[in-house]
């Protein structure tokens, strides 16, 4: 199931918007003046599928509708009720399906007089659970207990949210919130703290770990195949119906793949076997051995296929843009992102750069592309807010083409909000304009 259209009425008490998604091209671009609700629409959509229901309290609206490609739809609405010392927002979820009974669920977001948030759920108009932090909050004429979203939400709502993966890439993306657990020995009490780290550093460490994991997987597959190689060779009575030229072609292709994996940092140079890709005339026994060998190496190297394709695309896009500032990007399974300057300066003895040495525009581009390639599952809907941030006009012009290459490789759908005509280029057929009230 896919999202076909989203719409809102009464956004900020002013706007009614309808945004149909481009199902064929898989990229939809929303544009319009500041303050018309481009970011708000993305946040409302993300809030539903990722259960961040507080967004329905912070953004004023009357109804928010999500239409699916099977013509079912869900309507999200809000209303207020009065409880002593408390402001209550009832968030209603109504699911409509012409082939079955309509469904309804409500969650109640509350704010007490001290401004602290707590939440309760309603089902069939009965409040079931309320909490403030970890404390049970007694309420007049309300049954109270600890809120548990997983058990309280009905199955149909959980299944609906799980059927579509949505990820929001926000405009503030250069800092990453990291959590650390600290144990105080004297008091015997542990506590969790958080700090903001540069996202490029976090992602550099992530890709290094992913590369090491793939190399370990490659080692496990290699050991397994090498251990059974003699047995499989004996069991194969004769070589497949392959000509000498076909075997040589496969050997040559394997060496090209191996060289490519070395270039993107997934294999060490020592992994290059130096095996002759054009062996001399082959008898039946040699062909039999080589056919088993080729099959095994293809299986070993296939471990890297997906991550190699993503690294190569990211590297190509980044290097085509960073060349203007005389920088080059590579990957290393111990260091992650590796940058070097292509211009030797008399001011510095080193030609290497840390990811945090990049400009804000370079970091924005790297973080956005990395998230699209490595942080999102296939068949997800990705919401991108202001991809043009800190980007030179030349980079904005290239962005849509880069995005189309990424969509093709990763099987994603994109809904993005932008102010930049340079992002759009001549693809106004992909756009939806948000407009104000008719005067």
Image (cartoon, rainbow, N blue to C red):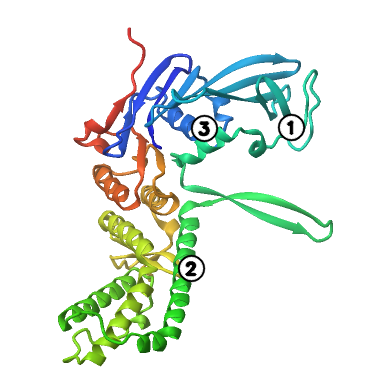
In the foreground, 176 or 309: 309
Quarter in which the N terminus is drawn: top left
Earlier in the chain: of badge 1 and badge 3, it is 3
Q: CA distance from mark 2 to mark 3?
A: 33 Å
Q: Are marks 2 and 3 in contact (CB under 8 Å)?
A: no
| Residue at x 52% of width, y 23% of height | 101
Indicate the quadrant where residue 149 lies.
top right
Give x and y (percent) for residue 92: 57, 22
Q: Give the vertical position of 247 relative to 335 (above or below).
A: below
| Residue at x 50% of width, y 52% of height | 198
Per the image, the residue denoted by label 2 is: 213
Give x and y (percent) for residue 65: 45, 24
Mark 1 nearby-residue class (10 Å; few <14, some 14–19, many ≥20)? some
Give x and y (percent) for residue 50: 53, 38
Q: Are marks 1 and 3 in contact (CB under 8 Å)?
A: no
In the foreground, 124 or 433: 124
Residue 275 visible in this rendered orientation of the protein: no
* Secondary structure of residue under mark 1: loop
Name the front one of labels 1 and 3: 3
Q: CA distance from mark 2 to mark 1?
A: 41 Å
In the foreground, 181 or 43: 43
The disc at residue 132 is 1
* Secondary structure of residue under mark 3: helix
């Amino acid at each position: 199931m896919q999202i076909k259209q989203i719409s809102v009425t009464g956004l900020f008490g002013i706007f009614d918007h309808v945004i149909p998604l481009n199902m064929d091209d898989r990229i939809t671009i929303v544009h319009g003046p500041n303050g018309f609700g481009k970011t708000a629409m993305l946040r409302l959509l993300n809030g539903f599928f990722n259960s961040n229901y507080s967004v329905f309290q912070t953004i004023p609206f009357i109804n928010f509708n999500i239409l699916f490609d099977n013509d079912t739809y869900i309507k999200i609405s809000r209303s207020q009720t009065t409880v002593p010392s408390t402001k209550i927002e009832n968030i209603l979820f109504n699911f409509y399906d012409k082939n079955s009974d309509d469904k309804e669920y409500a969650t109640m977001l509350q704010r007490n007089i001290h401004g602290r948030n707590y939440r309760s759920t309603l089902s069939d108009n009965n409040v079931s659970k309320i909490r403030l932090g970890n404390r049970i909050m007694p309420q007049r004429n309300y049954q109270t207990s600890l809120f548990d979203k997983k058990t309280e939400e009905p199955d149909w709502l959980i299944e609906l949210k799980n059927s579509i993966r949505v990820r929001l890439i926000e405009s503030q993306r250069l800092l990453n919130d990291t959590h650390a657990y600290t144990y105080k020995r004297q008091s015997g009490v542990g506590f969790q703290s958080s700090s903001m780290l540069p996202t490029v550093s976090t992602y550099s460490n992530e890709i290094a770990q992913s590369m090491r994991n793939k190399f370990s997987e490659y080692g496990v597959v290699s050991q397994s195949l090498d251990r059974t190689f003699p047995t499989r060779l004996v069991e194969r009575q004769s070589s497949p119906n392959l000509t000498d030229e076909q075997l040589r072609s496969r050997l040559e292709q394997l060496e090209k793949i191996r060289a490519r994996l070395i270039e993107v940092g997934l294999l060490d140079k020592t992994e290059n076997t130096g095996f002759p890709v054009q062996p001399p005339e082959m008898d039946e026994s040699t062909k039999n051995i080589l056919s088993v060998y080729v099959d095994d190496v293809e299986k070993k190297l296939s471990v890297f296929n997906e991550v190699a394709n993503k690294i190569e695309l990211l590297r190509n896009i980044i290097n085509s843009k960073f060349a203007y500032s005389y920088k080059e990007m590579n990957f290393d399974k111990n260091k992650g992102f590796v940058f070097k300057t292509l211009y030797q300066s008399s001011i510095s003895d080193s030609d290497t750069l840390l990811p945090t040495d990049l400009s804000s525009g370079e970091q924005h581009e790297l973080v956005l592309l990395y998230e699209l390639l490595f942080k999102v599952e296939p068949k997800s809907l990705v919401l991108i807010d202001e991809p043009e941030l800190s980007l030179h006009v030349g980079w904005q012009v290239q962005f849509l083409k880069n995005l189309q290459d990424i969509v093709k490789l990763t099987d994603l759908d994109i809904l993005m909000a932008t102010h930049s005509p340079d992002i759009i280029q001549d693809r106004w057929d992909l756009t939806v304009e948000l407009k104000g009230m008719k005067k």
